[in-house]
Amino acid sequence: MGWLPQTLIASPSQIVIDYWKFLANGALFKHSGISLFRLLVGFISGSLLGLIFGIGVGLSKFLNKLLSPLLQFLAPIPPIVWIPLLIIFFGIGEMSKIVLLMVASFFVLFINTVHGIRSVDNKLIEVANIYKKSNYFLITRIIIPSALSNIFLGLRLALGLSWILLIAAEVVASSKGLGWLIWDSRNFSRPDDMFVGIITIGILGKITDQLLIKAEEHFTSWKIKFNGK
Amino acid sequence: MSKSLKINIVKKSYPNSRFHILEDCCLDVKLKTFVTILGSSGCGKSTLLRTIAGIDNDYDGEIWIGDRLVKGPSKECSIVFQELRLFPWMKVKDNVLFALKKRKKTSEEEVVKILKFFDLENFGDLYPGDLSGGMSQKLALARALISVPDLLLLDEPFAALDYMTKMRLQNELIDNLNKLKTTVLMVTHDIEEAVFVSDKVMIMSRCPSKIVKSFEVNLPKPRDRSSKDFLIIYQKVLDYMLNVLNIK
């Protein structure tokens, strides 16, 4: 690899050595820890709000009429355009990043939850009505289980989007975190540090997605799935 | 407590339309008897069952179950839908438990008892998706019968099954209902099934539909499908459907 300038690209062996260094001095845990914290707080709180609003709008004609026009206007706005506004409101601290992920996760969960609830087989609802089941039973035992696949799809999409936005926000305004690490390494021509950041995002992204897949398998174990040929 | 059924529907229209599905549709089902309505597809058989079950209340006329005028769903009347409508995310036992109004200490025992009744006691922890067509059918029947209804409505319960399974389930159904002494109203388009299970077979005309003819089936149960008496009645019903309803 001698013919490539070391200020632009790092060799695999350099990356391995650098990765070990980052692990040994704890810098990797510091950057990953703060990134994961922002990701999880933003993603989980945003998803939870999206789920609650989605269930409300999915179930109630009134809430649908009340909230849908506004939410349908806001949903297509790319979350990344909120970054400047959020920095003005919340500064460059944790809050602006967390709120950004909340906004993004909220809309993904909202749309998928409403769709999931509106796709519930009306014939099954009719059965519950015949047996005069309470609204609580209807929601927890019939509507949510039936919408669960859509909700999990929403969660996985929101998680992927959260990673993208988190790194973007850390690049724009931050002093620590994996996004900052990558951008800072680029500015100081440390390609090996850059790859440490990239690889770590890949690993953490895979782990968090896998956790969601496992959770979905657990909650929808009754489903007979097509696993590919 | 089994109850009788009295229906007098003056007219029932399609939703958002003035075209009538049912017109002057009158019939009586006596206490503890099994009555079957035979008719071709789309003649309003399922609609009739929906009105009796109290799911569809938009019609002119009256329906009485025992001495109660039907105004909405009630626990004294259970219905088994053509498409079963089991809950795929609930275990077999929970699908049955679903039909009990309140969970009591004895609920679990009742579930085990009814599952045993239908030979499903070993499958309580499976999901409906794991069951065969015949077993799903029995599960739907178990769900309808656990609340000990006064009236059982069956909407083409065996239409989706193969001939062998269908015959076996018809036998089981007759056995079980004989023990429970429930009043039953079934709709089907299968003449043999109608003659095999019922005390009375009624024929429904095409739209706007009404009951145009009824046949008493005075044969002892369980019946022999290949006996002469059985075939005579079968022939009579078939002839009527071919000639009078002009199905060729």
Image (cartoon, rainbow, N blue to C red):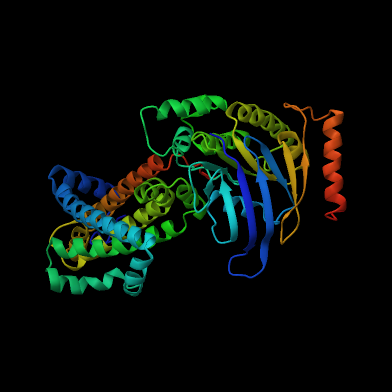
Q: Which residue is drawn at 77% across and 30% down?
A: B219
- Could you say which is closer to the camera, residue B131 or residue A202? B131
- Would you say residue B127 is visible in this rendering? yes
Q: Is residue B6 left or right of residue A19?
A: right
x and y percentages locating residue B138 in the rendered image: 59, 34
Measuring 41% from the left and 39% from the top, which residue is drawn there? B101
Residue in front for this viewpoint, A180 or A136? A136
Q: Quick check: B175 above or below A227?
A: above
Left or right position of B158 against A40: right
Quadrant containing the N terminus of chain A is: bottom left
**At 17% from the left edge and 65% from the top edge, which residue is drawn?**
A96
Residue A165 image-quadrant placement: bottom left
Q: Which residue is depicted at the point 57% across and 28% down?
A: B118
Total of numbered circles in the picture?
0
In which image quadrant can residue B29 be found?
Answer: top right
Check the picture and name the quadrant holding the C terminus of chain A: top right
* Foreground of the two, A164 or A49: A49
Q: Position of residue B154 (x, y in %)?
A: 62, 42
Image: B78 above or below B25: above
Q: In this view, does A81 lie to the left or right of B16?
A: left
Q: Residue A136 vs residue A102: left or right? A: right
- Residue A100 pos. (x, y %): 23, 65
- Expressed as whole percent of the image width and height from the top left, the position of residue A196 reads 24, 52
A202 w.r.t. A65: above or below: above
Instruction: Compare residues A142 and B5 and report the one nearer the observer.
Output: B5
